[in-house]
Image: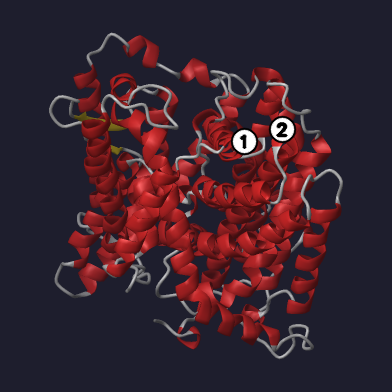
Amino acid sequence: MEKQNDFKPYIPAEKITPELTVTSIIMGIILAVVFGAANAYLGLRVGMTVSASIPAAVIGMGVIRVILRKNSVLESNIVQTIGSAGESLAAGAIFTIPALFLWAEEGVMEKPDIFEITIIALLGGLLGVFFMIPLRNALIVREHGTLPYPEGQACAEVMLAGEEGGANASTVFAGMGFAAFFKFVIDGLKVVPSEVNIEGSAKTYPGAIGTQIYPAVMSVGYICGPKISSYMFSGGLLSWLVLIPLIVIFGNNLVLYPGTETIGDIYAAGGASGIWGTYIRYIGAGALAAGGIISLIKSLPLIVRTFRDSMKGFNIMGGGKERTAQDINMTIVLIAILVLTLLVWLVPAIPVSLVGAIIVVIFGFFFATVSSRMVGLVGSSNNPVSGMAIATLLIATLILKLCGEVGAPGMQAAIAIGSIICIVAAISGDTSQDLKTGYLLGATPKKQQYGELIGVVASALAIGATLYLLDNAWHFGSEELGAPQATLMKMIIEGIMGGNLPWGLILIGVFIAVVVEILRIPVLPVAIGIYLPVQLNACIMVGGLIRLFFDRMKEGKKKNNIISNGILFCSGMIAGEGLVGIVLAILAVVGVGSVLDLSGMLSAVPSWIMSVGSIVVFGLIILSLLKFTVWNKKSNAKVVENTETQE
């Protein structure tokens, strides 16, 4: 593992440059609100959000350098730090809070008002930032050579490319251009399916395998390396080629909760995806919960040591430390956490008792740690925040029920706790990615932390109005806004309160995680692989295999340049897809997205021809990566640090 003193950031600690300026704050707030609104719609529509760190970095860099003609990479970094908070807070909010709207439609309780939504989002976001601050040294500095933080590194590469120009810039922006084009073809025009699947049948072998064809997902696999990619893919293979076939073969004629039809009927209607959505996600949630606990236990010595080291700065107020090692003073952090915890308990708009507030603190810090490590492995876009929320709701709802908080008040309290924890997990993951970017660039950590707090406040003030606007336009649970994650959270709480939660499926996931740990395989990547669709894991694996091929080349300058160019190009691909994802989300909100959709015109084309088209597009994405690596004759990009995760 690389020691802190061995690493030299782009901007030396002794050099002072503009960071937290009026320009960066205003731009960051605008981006936080815009990204938060766009991602709220996207997440309610498809159940997933896109990371806004890299798009915010690109926009910030473009405005500051091109329009304002200022040469300040750390100022651009603050813009992306503030701007990305909007997306993360929206992700945490839309996975849980719409459940309150759904219950209101059923007449179970009153619809939450905007103030209630705002205060839940605000407290969760602030807690997420403050929980992450004591972990910065442990996760960002001490494990710099272990946790790649792919999007954090991609942000840094994008901004450095803008600073330095030359081959670095051309490689990064080429990646952005290619990914933007492919993303627009896949999700904008929709001329080819976003997935290629091969599925068996109930009579032969009811398993399934396939891959997504998104350039950013493949790029995450390349940046993370073959080890992490293979662990995730193994989890996907276990769920889709072992667990799903076993469920269908042995339970074909059974009605197993949470399903309301026989397993055979569920498979006939939705194939392997139907079984995954009905049963496997509970197994994945159990594995994630167990993996998180195991990860926390293993990390406790390092966390305690780091926290103890942070405590030594109580009376120093940041003095005596070099600029790049200064966090917000720990006294302020602890007081803020205490005050926020009391507000969770005492604010009338939040229906949480003292027991609930204690649950928030314990699970908040726990999932802040897990989320920060997880995004270090697979990136923010693939951070299963909803899986953490499921694990929280399972335990929190059970505790509330044992304490006598049942019925509508208990359900409302459970979703409030789950919402805060979900937002904590999302924001802490985003904060850790941003701090990784700042660590590479040479930013001042406490200024980034202040920026994150500003972004949380701005986006929290906007999220309530955004949710009300979307609900009034289409209503949550409708065809336009299915709110799949919130619907699942609602079902879990109702299941526990009614005493019919599928604990068997959850415990299967727990014991799978235990077996994986006994085999000395990292639990969290495997658990993520079980929880996420195998198509996403397979796409990541493709990137990991390309990186494996490069890693096994003969040592020398050419190999280093190839790997370096690959990281730069993949960083650009993540940025390009992220930017177009945001644009498509905004176009969907204003009603223009359907105009671009050409899938209706191609509905008569046989499915196998469409699948061939997807394979061709994916092949072109891979070829574009090879063009700027092994087939790049110039090979004059600087060598960037190998980010493969080490055991």
In the picture of the structure, the residue carrying the numbered disc 1 is 40
- The colour scheme is secondary structure
Separation of marks 1 and 2 at Cα, in angstroms: 8 Å
The reply to whether callout 1 and callout 2 are in contact (CB within 8 Å) is: yes
For this rendering, which residue is in front, 77 or 305? Answer: 305
Q: Which tag, 1 or 2, sits closer to the chain's start?
A: 1
Numbered disc total:
2
Estimate the x, y position of residue 152 in percent, counting from the top left: 50, 61
The reply to whether residue 640 is visible in this rendering is yes
Q: Is residue 132 above or below residue 282?
A: below
Q: Secondary structure at mark 1?
A: helix
In the picture of the structure, the residue carrying the numbered disc 2 is 466
Q: Secondary structure at mark 2?
A: helix
Estimate the x, y position of residue 379 in percent, counting from the top left: 45, 55
Residue type of the residue flagged with mark 2: Thr
Q: Name the residue: 15% across, 24% down.
A: 203
Quarter that holds the N terminus: bottom left
Q: Name the residue: 77% across, 61% down.
A: 341
For this rendering, which residue is in front, 421 or 19? Answer: 421
Q: In this image, 471 relative to 212: left or right?
A: right
Estimate the x, y position of residue 229 in percent, counting from the top left: 30, 56
The reply to whether residue 61 is visible in this rendering is no
Residue type of the residue flagged with mark 1: Ala
Quarter that holds the C terminus: bottom left
Q: Is residue 533 above or below residue 329?
A: above
Estimate the x, y position of residue 599 in percent, counting from the top left: 37, 16
Q: In this image, 559 relative to 579: left or right?
A: left
Q: In this image, 22 relative to 565: left or right?
A: right
For this rendering, which residue is in front, 329 or 265? Answer: 265
Callout 2: few (<14), some (14-19), or many (20+) C-alpha neighbours within 10 Å?
some
